[in-house]
Image: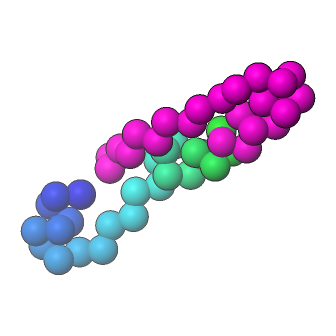
Amino acid sequence: AHIARENELSFFAAGHHATERYGVQALGEYLAKRFAIEHLFIDCPNPA
């Protein structure tokens, strides 16, 4: 990411974090409702 920024290039990080975090949040919400439990999604960005 830093090399792209330094060279004024566009960069799109589409790894697991960028593409899969919403599914994990939805699953947590579903399980919380289904089993009457509490869940907390902690978003920890990863630029790689």
Q: Quadrant of residue 41?
A: top right
Q: Considering depth in this image, is 32 or 26 the residue closer to the camera?
A: 32
* Residue drawn at x 24%, y 57% as measured from the top left: 1
* Residue drawn at x 16%, y 58% as measured from the top left: 2
Q: Is residue 30 magenta?
A: yes
Q: Is residue 8 above or below residue 46?
A: below
The picture places residue 45, in percent across and down from the top left corner, at 38, 45
Task: Look at the image and name its color scheme.
Answer: rainbow
Q: Is residue 42 magenta?
A: yes
Is 38 displayed left or right of 15 in the figure? right
* Residue drawn at x 17%, y 77% as measured from the top left: 8
The picture places residue 29, in percent across and down from the top left corner, at 75, 38
* Residue drawn at x 64%, y 49% as measured from the top left: 22
The picture places residue 24, in percent across and down from the top left corner, at 65, 38
Q: In this view, which residue lies farthest toward the bottom?
A: 8
Q: Is residue 14 above or below residue 44?
A: below
Where does the magenta region start and end? 25-48
Q: In this view, which residue lies farthest toward the right?
A: 34
Is 26 displayed left or right of 3 in the figure? right
Q: Is residue 2 above or below residue 34?
A: below
The picture places residue 36, in percent across and down from the top left corner, at 84, 24
How many marks are shown on the rendered structure?
0
